[in-house]
């Protein structure tokens, strides 16, 4: 009888323990779900203001309770520096936990860590091993990465190329170009910022330590009071119409977005919105340098872009005058002339055009305002001149630029 009672008591205790454990597991599962859902809301800005700090905090709470997806999410945030201090070492360590569970997303990112030297020593064979494991589980991004000959951080000579091309005063305090560093903005004056710039767009990895892409960049900026307009062209391909304004010490872009390609989206660009640009101006000799940080945000990915640095230059005012005259190709024929002279010139963008004739004392003798003309080559006959033989100054005024030419009346 006593033996039967003890067996009954033991069985009852066991069921009680299992029931209690089941309740605890249910409570833990509910807490994990609550933390994870809050994290996703803050990360994506669904129903709340987007806040990466809050998202990271809730992901960590769910991860501490043993949720594998939240462990991956914390690693992802560390990898990109979203809501935390960017740290490849921490990311790689957490991705490895997902690798042990054969999670496709963790295998993919762990492969990227090995391929690019992010938190793990760079090793192509090891990288391909983990990428293939992820691809075998059907992870599409891993398949695409395996098709790529090199990882994003494969241009080991990029720093030397940039140093050769961009060794100028636009990089403040002799900063090393192989490390992304935010610079203090110094806003250009309105008479300097307008114009045509050419240079380079440098994209860094998430840590800002490695240059992963270099693109040719040309930018045309027009300034109307404090409003900015113009065009942004990368590699003669990705193009955006720029709109914005000068606010405080920044150039802030608004209603400006474009599609740009990168290592992970070569076939189809990702749409990005310009957020702001911190521009630093340095004028050295006859060259003007404009350099700074560009912040972009992808609504498609719900994330900011990797760090971007722009280094642009355009000829100074003296060089601009020389280039202007050369491109204008201003001529007058015949010269010397008799009863009529024809002025010929080129225009490479729409401009207001006016022709004036002065004598050597500066007295205005003739004026013809042709209005706004589109780009092209023009011939403008000048007739009805009641002037004596001698030397005269012909001036062609395009917008706010002036070209002058000596002509002789027979």
Image (cartoon, helix red, strand yellow):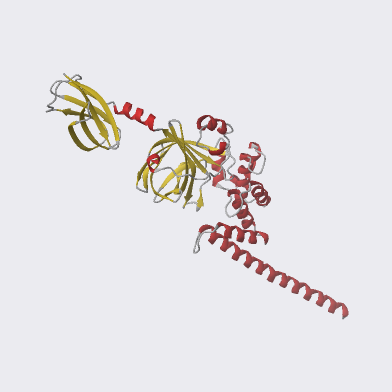
Place residue 144 in its image quadrant.
Answer: top right
Decide: is 164 above or below 113.
Answer: above
Question: Looking at the image, is 232 positioned above or below residue 54?
Answer: above
Q: Residue furthest front?
A: 361
**Image height of 114 relative to 55, above or below:** above
In-front residue for pair 409/4: 409
Q: Quadrant of the C terminus?
A: top left
Query: Residue 365, percent across and down?
Result: 17, 30
Along the viewing direction, whichever of 353 and 346 lies nearer the viewer: 353
- Quick check: 203 left or right of 2? left
Outermost residue on the right side: it is 2
- Left or right: residue 272 versus residue 124 is left
Quadrant into which the N terminus falls: bottom right
Query: Could you say which is closer to the camera, residue 82 or residue 367?
Result: 367
* Position in image of residue 341 (x %, y %): 17, 24
Query: What residue do we see at 58% from left, 49% from top?
Result: 80
- On the image, the x and y values in percent for residue 374 come to 25, 36
């Amino acid at each position: 009888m006593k033996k039967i009672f003890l067996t009954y008591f033991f069985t009852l205790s066991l069921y009680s323990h299992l029931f209690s454990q089941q309740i605890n597991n249910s409570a833990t599962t509910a807490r994990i779900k609550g933390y994870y859902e809050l994290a996703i809301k803050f990360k994506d800005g669904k129903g709340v203001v987007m806040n990466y700090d809050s998202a990271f905090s809730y992901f960590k709470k769910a991860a501490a309770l043993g949720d594998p997806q939240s462990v991956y999410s914390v690693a992802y945030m560390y990898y990109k520096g979203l809501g935390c201090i960017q740290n490849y070492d921490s990311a790689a360590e957490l991705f490895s936990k997902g690798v042990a569970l054969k999670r496709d997303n963790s295998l993919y990112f762990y492969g990227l860590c090995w391929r690019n030297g992010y938190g793990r020593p760079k090793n192509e064979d090891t990288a391909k091993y983990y990428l293939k494991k992820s691809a075998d589980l059907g992870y599409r991004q891993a398949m695409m990465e395996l098709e790529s000959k090199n990882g994003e951080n494969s241009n080991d000579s990029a720093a030397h190329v940039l140093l050769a091309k961009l060794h100028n005063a636009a990089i403040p305090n002799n900063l090393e170009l192989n490390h992304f560093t935010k610079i203090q903005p110094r806003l250009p004056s309105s008479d300097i910022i307008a114009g045509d710039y050419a240079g380079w767009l440098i994209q860094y990895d998430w840590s800002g330590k490695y240059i992963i892409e270099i693109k040719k960049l040309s930018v045309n900026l027009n300034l109307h009071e404090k409003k900015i307009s113009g065009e942004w062209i990368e590699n003669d391909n990705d193009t955006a119409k720029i709109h914005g304004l000068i606010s405080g010490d920044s150039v802030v872009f608004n209603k400006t977005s474009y599609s740009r390609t990168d290592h992970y989206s070569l076939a189809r660009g990702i749409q990005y919105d310009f957020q702001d640009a911190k521009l630093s101006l340095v004028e050295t000799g006859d060259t003007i340098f404009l350099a700074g940080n560009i912040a972009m945000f992808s609504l498609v990915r719900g994330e900011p872009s990797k760090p971007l640095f722009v280094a642009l230059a355009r000829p100074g005012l003296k060089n601009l005058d020389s280039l202007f005259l050369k491109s204008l190709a201003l001529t007058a024929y015949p010269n010397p002339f008799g009863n009529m002279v024809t002025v010929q010139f080129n225009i490479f963008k729409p401009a207001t055009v006016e022709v004036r004739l002065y004598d050597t004392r500066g007295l205005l003798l003739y004026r013809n305002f042709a209005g706004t003309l589109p780009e092209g080559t023009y011939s403008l006959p000048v007739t009805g001149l009641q002037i004596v033989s001698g030397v005269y100054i012909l001036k062609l005024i395009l917008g706010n630029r002036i070209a002058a030419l000596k002509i002789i009346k027979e």
